[in-house]
Amino acid sequence: MRLVPLAALLLATAVPAAAQDAAPPPPTWPAAPPKLIVAISVDQFSGDLFAEYRSRFTGGFARLMQGAVFPAGFQSHAATETCPGHSTILTGSRPARTGIIANEWVDQRAPRADKTVYCAEDERVPGSTSDNYTVSDIHLKVPTLGERMKAADPRTRVVSVAGKDRAAVMMGGHKVDELWWFGKDGFVSYADRAVPPVVARANAAVAQRVATAQPAMTLPTYCQPLSRAVQIGDKTVGTGRFAREAGDIGSFRRSPEFDAAVLALAAGLVQDMKLGKGPQTDIISIGASATDYVGHGYGTEGSEMCLQLTSLDQSLGAFFAVLDREGIDYQVVLTADHGGSDASERLAHHAVPDAVRLDGNLTTEKVGAAIGQKLNIPGRVLFGGVNGDVWYDIALTPVQRTAVEREAIARFSAHPQTQAVFTRAQVLATTVPSTPPETWSLIERARASFDPTRSGDLLVAMKPRVLTVPHPVAGKSVATHGSFWDYDRRVPILFWRKGAGGFEEPFGIETVDILPTLAATIGLAVPRGEIDGRCLDLNPGDGTTCR
C-alpha cells in the first residue's frame, strides 16, 4: 500500500538495519536515562482494535511490540472521552484529580450566556462560547510530566503537537516551549506564539496537500474481507478508501493524511529544536487524532479503519526512522485516550443483535421537560447529556430540587436502556478504588471521574452496547464512545526503548501508571500522594526500572 504522500514529503526515509553475522547479546536496560521521551496518544485506539490488527503491523507499531506490551491498559474512569483520557496520560492522575471530568460540562455560574464549558477553553474571555473559544490550560488542575521535568531542570524542552487542541493542551500542560494543534486549515497555537519556520513549512505542505484531489487508496489484501457496505440512515459506510476532492479539509481530517501531517510536524520540531541532543532529557507529546475521526465517521470496522491503522503504522515507522537517523536515545510510550464502539447496524450483522442506538426520547432535555411539566416548574430543570453528568437548575428551591431529583431518578431508572443512576452523594461516599481496574464496579468508575466542583448532580449510565448516537443518525458521526464499559475503557499501553528488551503482561494496568513509570527511567522523584498511578518495571530481567 502506498505511503501517505505527506509523510513521504516531510519525513526522512528509514535507515536499513545493518546485517548481523551472529545473534545479538541478550538485551539489558540502558544504564543512562533516555535523552528524549516520546509520548504518543492514538485517539480511540481501543484494546479491541489493537488485538484485531496487531498481527498486521509491520512498521511503527511492530517496533513498539518488541518492547513492554500491556494489551489491557485502562482509562479506568467512566468518562471515556477525549479530554479526560488525555488528561490522565502524562499527569499520573485520574479525572477526579485532574478536574477534566468530560469534554464539556455545565457551569451555571459561568460569566456568559453559554453555560457549557469546553475542557480546553477560557470561558472568561468576552464574547466566547463553548463552540467559539480561546484555547487555554486553566481547567487542568495538576502538572504534567513535562512540567515536573522542567521544574527539576529548567533546561528541559517541553513540546506538544496534536490534531486536536484538547489533546495538545492536556498532554503538554501549563509550561510548554512549543504547543501546536490543527485549527481550521493548519497548525495553530496560542495567540502570543511566533510561528517557527518548521510550522510554516508544515502548513504550506498541508495547504498544498489539501488543494490536491486524492484518488482512492489501494486496499491491502487483508482489508478486503472487511470491505462491506453498511447502510446507516442515509449514509453508506464500510467500503470507503479515502478518495478526496481538492479543497476538502473535512475529509483530510478524517483520513490517514491527518496523522501523517501531525507526525511530520513532530519530526520537524525534533530536528529543528535538536530535542534529545542536550545534556538534559526533553519530552514531546503527540496526539494522533485521525483514528477517532474515522471511528466516528465510519465506525471501527470496515475498509476505512483497516486503511487508517495500516497507514498510521507506516507513518509511525517513518517518524521513528527520523529519530534513529538523528542518533537520539529516545523512550517511547504509546497509548490511547479511550476506546470506542462500532455502529450498531454493523454490530447487528456481526452477531451482536442487542447493540442498539439510544432512544431519542431519553435525553436530559426531554426528561427535564416532562419533569418540569409535572411539577409545574417553568423553564429548564435539567442540564447536561445522557450517559454521564446531569445537573439540576441552581435556581430551584430546596423543595423543588428534592422533587426534581426524585422524578429524575425514577424516569431515568425506568427506561430499559438505563443500567444505573447515581446521585452526587452516592458517588462521593464511594472510596476511590485501588484494586485492578478491570474489577471496578460502575460507581467506582464514576468516582474516578468525579470532581465535586464540576461534576453533575446525577450520573446516568446506559446499558452495554447502547450507542449514544440516537436515531435518526444526524451529522457526521455514526459511532461513538463515552460509556462506562470496558470496550471504551480498555486501551493498549506500549513502552519501547532501543536495546531494552521486552515482554508482554496481560493483566490490567492504568494510563495513570505512565507518568511514574517514565519518571523513574529519568530519575525524577514524584511524591506518591500527588498522583494516582504506580511505577511499572520495564526491565524484562532481574533488575528494575522503578527506583
Image (tube, rainbow, N blue to C red):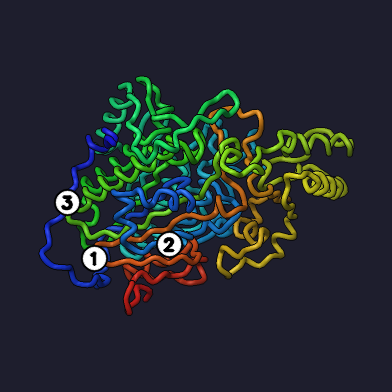
- In the image, residue 273 lies at what x, y percent? 23, 48
Choose between 472 and 128: the one closer to the eye.
472
Q: Amino acid at mark 3?
A: Arg
**Mark 1, other Cα within 10 Å: few <14 / some 14–19 / many ≥20:** some
Q: In this rendering, would 113 be left or right of 506?
A: right
- In the image, residue 371 lies at what x, y percent? 83, 39
Q: Which residue is mark 2?
A: 70
Q: In this rendering, would 350 be left or right of 330?
A: right
Quadrant for residue 78, please give it: bottom right
**Mark 3, other Cα within 10 Å: few <14 / some 14–19 / many ≥20:** few
Q: Which residue is mark 3?
A: 325
Picture quarter with the C terminus: bottom left
- In the image, residue 407 lies at what x, y percent? 84, 45
Picture quarter with the N terminus: top left
Q: Label 1 to label 3, Cα distance in Å?
A: 16 Å
Disc 1 to disc 3: CB gap under 8 Å: no
Choose between 330 and 226: the one closer to the eye.
226
Q: Label 2 to label 1, Cα distance in Å?
A: 19 Å
Q: Secondary structure at mark 3?
A: helix
**Which label belongs to residue 499?**
1
Quadrant for residue 29, please give it: bottom left
Q: Is residue 401 above or below residue 229?
A: below
Q: Label 2 to label 3, Cα distance in Å?
A: 28 Å
Q: Is residue 171 above or below residue 477?
A: below
**Residue sitting at x 20%, y 53%:** 324
**Mark 2, other Cα within 10 Å: few <14 / some 14–19 / many ≥20:** many
**Residue sitting at x 74%, y 35%:** 365
**Residue sitting at x 17%, y 51%:** 325
Quadrant for residue 477, please give it: top right
